[in-house]
Amino acid sequence: MDISFDAIPLAHYLLLSATLFVIGVMGVLMRRNAIVVFMSIEIMLNAVNISLISFDRYLNQHDGQIFSFMVMCVAAAEVSVGLAIIIALFRNKPTVNLDEFNIMKS
């Protein structure tokens, strides 16, 4: 059973993208765990990818796929650098709670 992309309206993809983006923003603003904050940022980046690809297919161009690939590359770099920072902070203070980190304090 193959469902064509044209069978689902653009508004449904944009609604899914907006919902995921709002979930990601709420996760960044409300959670204090560094790992959960990074996962919320990844959800927000995936929401952007969904909207880019849906507009790409709707307008019948390929720019959205190129930008989506760039967003995935940025997300991969963000994960590697972010997890390295979290591991370095965890070695100094054995917690991943963002409220307990104060790097400016000597």
Image (spheres, helix red, strand yellow):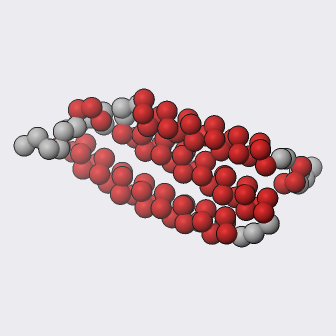
Q: Report the residue at 42% width, 33% height from top.
A: 29
Nearest the eye: 58 or 3: 58
Residue at the outermost right position: 1
Q: Residue at x 61, y 48 (%)?
A: 47
> Residue 101 location in percent, x, y?
22, 37
Q: Residue furthest left?
A: 106
Residue at the outermost top position: 30
Q: Relative to residue 14, is residue 86 drawn left or right?
A: left
Q: Residue 55, position in %: x, y?
A: 72, 57
- From the viewer's perspective, is 100 left or right of 7? left
Residue 102: image quadrant is: top left
Choose top left, top right, bottom left or bottom right for residue 93: top left
Q: Residue at x 78, y 63 (%)?
A: 59
Residue at 56% over, 37% down = 22
Percent across and percent down for residue 96 are: 30, 37
On the image, the x and y values in percent for residue 53 come to 70, 58
Above or below, 71 against 23 in this view is below
Residue 96 versus residue 1 in the image, above or below: above
For the image, the number of numbered tags is: 0
Q: Is 39 on the left or on the right of 89, as rendered?
A: right
Q: Where the C terminus falls, by quadrant?
A: top left
